[in-house]
Image (spheres, rainbow, N blue to C red):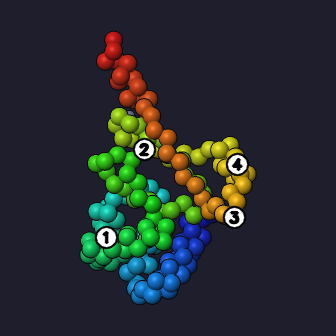
Amino acid sequence: MTIENEKILAKQRLEEFLKTKKLRKTGERFQILDCIYSQSSFFTLLELYDKMNKDYFHVSLSTIYYTIELLLQCNLVIRHTFDLQNVRYEKTPLGSNHYYRICMQCGTTKAFTDLKLKKSISLRDYHAFTPQYHSLYIYGICKKCGQKNAEVKK
Ligand SMILES: [Zn+2]
């Protein structure tokens, strides 16, 4: 799925959500959604605030905060707490699945794809439930930290 298709799908979902909850369809909310769906990496609220004010128009930090809460409610944004110091956000992968490798020592996070795993999950029967995407966290020690640890033991 292209970024443009993902944006259209996300916009439709937000429209439906706002209608259902009887909330106003403000331009700001859709611009923030557009800004989030234009990037493919993790971001913090402050980074989103900076990007909005640089590439779009001025919004307050409280607008960013409130909009993220809305987008979390309708599952258009995922909140990751890979480690306790950093809360990071990411657009929901509407057209793909995300797997993450997280180093428990330095906190480095890498997204990867696994076609075998993806196929195996897609072939499962979830009884009266239609999966849309899935996400998996694998915790461990990265190569760099592994080497550092081996040095210390010597
Ligand atoms: Zn590490």
Q: Please give the name of the residue rendered at 28% of the width and 48% of the height, measured from the top-left corner.
A: 85
Mark found first going from the N terminus, 1 or 4: 1
Label of residue 119 in the image? 4
Label of residue 65 in the image? 1
Instruction: Provide the secondary structure element on which disc 4 rests.
Output: helix
Q: CA distance from mark 3 to mark 2?
A: 34 Å
Of circles 1 and 3, which is in front?
A: 3
Question: Label 1 amino acid?
Answer: Tyr
Mark found first going from the N terminus, 3 or 4: 4
Of circles 3 and 4, which is in front?
A: 3
Mark found first going from the N terminus, 1 or 2: 1
Label 1 crowd (10 A; few <14 / some 14-19 / many >=20): some
Q: Which residue is mark 3?
A: 128
- Which is more toward the observer, 8 or 81? 81
- Which is more toward the observer, 84 or 47? 84
Residue 149 at x, y percent in the picture: 35, 22
User: On the rendered structure, is 87 left or right of 117?
Assistant: left
Q: CA distance from mark 3 to mark 4?
A: 19 Å
Q: CA distance from mark 1 to mark 4?
A: 36 Å
Quadrant in which the C terminus is drawn? top left
- Which is more toward the observer, 122 or 40? 122
Instruction: Provide the secondary structure element on which disc 3 rests.
Output: loop
Quarter of the figure with residue 96:
bottom right
Evaluate whether residue 82 shows in this view. yes
Label 2 crowd (10 A; few <14 / some 14-19 / many >=20): some
Of circles 2 and 4, which is in front?
A: 4
Q: Which residue is mark 2?
A: 109
Question: Label 3 amino acid?
Answer: Ala
Disc tally is 4
User: On the rendered structure, is 12 left or right of 30?
Assistant: right
